[in-house]
Amino acid sequence: MSLELRNVMKSYSEPNGGRLPVLNVKEFKLATGEQAVLLGSSGGGKTTLLNVIAGITAADSGAVFVGGTDIVRMPEAARDRLRAERIGYVFQAFHLLPAFSALENVLLGMSFGGKRPDRSRAIKLLDRVGLSHRLHHKPAQMSVGEQQRASVARALANTPRLLLADEPTASVDAANQKTVLDLIRDSCRENHVSLLLVTHAPEIACQFDRVETLSDFNKPV
Amino acid sequence: MNIATIAWKNLCQRSLASSLTALSVALGVMLMVAVLVIYGILQSTFSQRTINYDLIVGAKGDPLQLVLSTVYHISPPIENLPYRYYLDWKKDKRIEAAIPLAMGDVTQEGSFPIVGTIPEFFEIDYAPKRKFLIKGGAFRRPFDAYIGSRVAIQNGWAVGATLKLVHGGAETGHVHNEEFTVVGILAPTGTPHDKTVYVNLEGFYQIEGHDKPLNEAITREREFYRETPLTELEMAAEITRLQAQFGMHDHGGHDHGGHDHLHELPPVQKQVTAVLLLCKGLTVGPLIAGDLKKGYQAQAVNPIFPMQKLMDQFLRPATDLLLVLTILIIIVSGIGIFVSIYNSMAARRREIAIMRALGAQRLTVFAIILAESIILCVGGGVFGLIFGHGLVFAAAPLVESYTGLIVNPRAFDPQELILFPALLVLAALVGILPGLTAYRTDVAESLSGN
């Protein structure tokens, strides 16, 4: 699924009543099946950008075309539905639900898209990420690396066409960073899923063919 | 995973708080169910469903006492009436059936009330369209007895068992020598018949002490009918006449334990405690009751009215008060659910945001919170219903032994059906505010940890 941003602006309210501009993206494109990394410093608007693309946060202005559809013009419920059906999101802090096992977290990733959760597919995904022995374990019973792998499986659960990854290796130790990264990239390649990964780590970025620096095209005013 | 499953998992994550909250609802519902069921049992016990007679005729006195002693056997009888008075009613053309009852004794085992009556008593429905079903033989011979189902179970009596009558209390009263034989066991009726022993009236009068001395009996009967008292000579002549007519002799010379030695008693020596009347026509009963009220001899009471008055004056207000209290308990429990869920929302902002980030819509997360509230309320209600009926079941033997009332532990009050819709409404009300909190969760802000 392709992605295109045009003149996207986003700002937040400040305590003093002013506005803090975070995003001012003139143009950004991602082709279907393409994998790209956005390099940016902390506080540079990486997460905000991903949230706007995912429809979690609405842009103040501009257009965000996800698979050819401008989600900025969409009602919130429609954005939620699009996200549930076609976008996967790997969070920096994993954000697994503590009350649910690894399998249930993956099933949850399938639950909001209107289709019946596919248990056997969820098990295959977890097996793919090397967690077949942790199906019924809750996040508190898994290591950090396992939790991140479970969140990758969940992000792929709804057969997304676009995967967004927000610093997916930031909370993971060095030994597991490559594993997690390879997992994300291989899974996307296998399923022809477009991938947009944001990171502040150059050593991560250098593993991708396409590296963009956020500050090159995001110039908040 | 559907909304209910997600809600259930969330509740399990906070299992202790959830259990305690549901328990508070369960306790309130349990109390309400117990009150409703017990009141329903009382209502049924003291209604037309347990008696089929139009009038109870008894000595002048408290109508409530007459009904309680005659129908429910939980109050001592007022006073006896002459047997001749029963015969008068039997001959009355306005009366379909007149059944005499003689009371005052209890069984040695179990202290069950003993009622002397005639075989026709069991041919009449004991309640509208409800016939006596008897396992055993006919109630014909003087020392035959029928026992209620509870008597049979509690005392372990079967057909062929024998029993003696005790006057003045099972443990300290006088035990009569005469033995009655159980010839039949009544099928359960859910009425006081289940805890009663019926003996043939003929045999009842054969018991030593149940026949008044002739001179006393004659005097009392004449007083009852306001007939001129007899002089000494007249009394002696009357006694001689009766003795000759009924072949009477001195009772002091032999034992009264044997069944083969029946004494035919003149009617004047017999007494009844009450007479049950079935009237011909709807207007007859009130007319008879009105006539007797004006008279001096006896009273006739519709068995339903005093009980209904008791229910309306005392039991109904008390029950209403209890119901109000239990409703308040349930409402307070509902507030507990609100507080529990609402307080948890602060800690669950991130979880709500995660679900929203996964594509759940605002209404979905609202529905999940509402579902949690409903599960707690309705789940607590289900347990409350079970506990309530369990409480009635457990308390039934105690209530029966203390009050003499028959408690059907499986009784169900139709008002219980209102409980679940009411709990749903309560759940919706207490779940709205926490649900709105979930609805309004800022996803980005909550995920970032702010």
Image (tube, coloured by chain):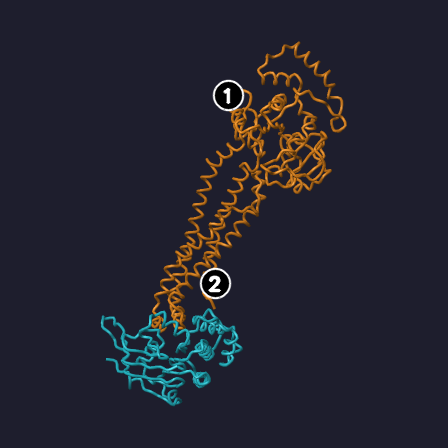
Q: For this rendering, which residue is in front, B233 or A68?
A: A68
Residue A84, placed above or below residue B289:
below
Q: Which chain is cyan?
A: A
Q: Label 2 neighbourhood size at 10 Å, few (<14), some (14-19), many (20+)?
A: few
Relative horizontal placement of residue B121, taking residue B345 as reference (left or right): right
Residues at marks 1 and 2 on the same chain:
yes
Going by the numbered disc 2, the residue's amino acid type is Ser
Quarter of the image for residue B374 reads bottom left
Q: Which residue is mark 2?
A: B15
Which SS class for mark 1?
A: helix
Marks 1,2: beta carbons within 8 A: no
Residue A131 position, x and y percent, is: 51, 78
Image quadrant holding the C terminus of chain B, namely bottom left
Q: Which residue is mark 1?
A: B294
Q: Check residue B150 in the rendering and tell me which mark sits there, or answer none.
A: none
| Residue depicted at x 53% and y 52% | B386
Image coordinates of residue B323 in percent, x first then y, are 45, 45
User: Of marks 1 and 2, which one's residue comes earlier in the chain?
Assistant: 2
Q: Visible in this render: residue B172? A: no
Q: Chain of mark 2?
A: B
Whether residue B410 sits left or right of residue B449 in the image: it is right
Residue B267 appears in the figure: yes
Q: CA distance from mark 1 to mark 2?
A: 70 Å
Is the residue marked by circle 1 packed among few (<14), some (14-19), or many (20+) residues within 10 Å?
few
Residue type at numbered disc 1: Lys
x, y (%) of residue B100? 62, 27
Q: Chain of mark 1?
A: B
Looking at the picture, tell me which residue is in the foreground, B126 or B438.
Answer: B126
Q: Marks 1 and 2: which is nearer the front?
A: 1
- Picture coordinates of residue B291, whole percent (x, y): 52, 22
In the image, the chain rendered in orange is B
Residue in the foreground of this view, choosing between B3 and B405 = B3
